[in-house]
Image: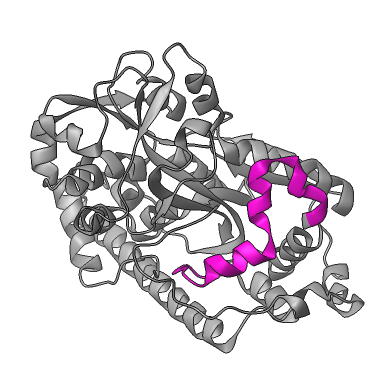
Amino acid sequence: MRITSLKPMVGACLSLAGGLAFGLASLAHAEEFTMPHLLVIGTPGTSSGSFASTNGWGPILQKDLGTNVRVVPEDSEVQRHRRLTERRDLALSSVSTAELRFQIQGIGHYATMTPVPQRVIWHHNDTPWSFVVSGDSDLHTMDDLKKGGVRVARGQFSPPMIAAVTDALPAYLGMTSAEGAENLRFVPASSYVENCRAVVEGKADVAYCATISSVMAEMEGAPGGIRWLSMDLDSSQAWEGFLEHRPMVVPGTISMGVSSAKGVDGLVSNFLYAAPADADEAFAYTMAKWFHQSYDTYKGSHPLSTRMSLEVFREYLNRSPLPVHEGTVRYLKEVNVWTEEDDKLNQEAIKKMDSWMVARRAALAEAKESGIEPNMNNDRFMAIVDKHTQGLEGFRTRL
């Protein structure tokens, strides 16, 4: 996908020639590791591109590595995170960088959960998002949303999606969150599909959706179709406001997904395959090696799988603020696409994540000792969280 950033991309362009000349020596560590009998991978719900694309490469990995691959759709981001980090019945999770930030920093309901450090295993996709309306809507530009009384679908299942419409959208329009609550009418939706369909079912005037999800193709084919409101890349002030609340996204012109969205200015949200930091190094190494070596075999299984190449992953690393798993790092070093600068940035990312984990554990411990219920709606608990995390630097994409 072509990405047109508001700021110039930082980072040197590295040749991948050495990485493509992959020899037998790199197989040594992999041979020491036996894949688990069952590999369970969590993704967003069945209508998501993440679920479809993971189901595309899963059978190929199963055949190659002899492990039974099970892809589990879980619409609730909180529940999928709990299964990965607490219940440990998922080995990998396809998760957006926006959601990872919420999980790491304990934003919203995540503040009440036991903090668990995570690591990036591989790049999954870079999903285009924007605001969609019905084809016969009288809303034609983002500025039209300022007229007041506009009904905005609000997905209750994902904290970042809530932030996108209740905080980031008003900021883009030049409003505070409080002013947004006064001027916009938020319509709750219990699932991603319900959130998007709301505009063609007449329940909402505008919704925040991914252009590549299957439900968008269904909506595009509905009577009247759909349209997308362009988020003008030249509107620097508007984007600064949006990024204040959604700091992990990248502004860009959409070139993937339903035809009605192509050429429209929107944003990109990267999805990654992530695992707990204590996941076996040999497992991460084996997965990274397979994702790279088998790319030509699985890239045709789904359009999003084309975004899992080593080249795309390398480009993403140039701007990622998130720590990469040591097993993946070892593999990337072997194929000569990991630099000393990457090492420095990765250690800084690990240190930053650890500082959030320590602070949040301390907050939960204090709340327990004080008999205060860990609840995001409990002001006394959130005050404790704020006290322990005050001054910590948040995660933000390097543009």
Q: Position of residue 82 (x, y in %)?
A: 49, 45
Q: Residue at x 61, y 62 (%)?
A: 312
Direction from residue 97 to residue 164 in the image, left or right: left
| Magenta stretch, residue numbers | 296-323
Q: Nearer the viewer, residue 283 or 159?
A: 159
In the rendered image, residue 39 lying in the magenta stretch gets the answer: no
Q: Position of residue 118 (x, y in %)?
A: 51, 62
Direction from residue 110 to residue 294 in the image, left or right: right
Which secondary structure type mostly characterizes the magenta part of the structure? helix
Residue sticking out furthest to the bottom: 340
Q: Nearer the viewer, residue 59 or 210?
A: 210
Q: Nearer the viewer, residue 270 or 131?
A: 131
Q: Residue at x 21, y 45 (%)?
A: 167
Which image quarter: residue 68?
Answer: top right
Is residue 376 something that shows in the picture? no
Q: Nearer the viewer, residue 193 or 81?
A: 193
Q: Residue at x 69, y 75 (%)?
A: 332
Residue sticking out furthest to the right: 24
**Which quadrant is the C terminus positioned in?**
bottom left
Location of residue 340 with respect to 397 vertically, above or below: below
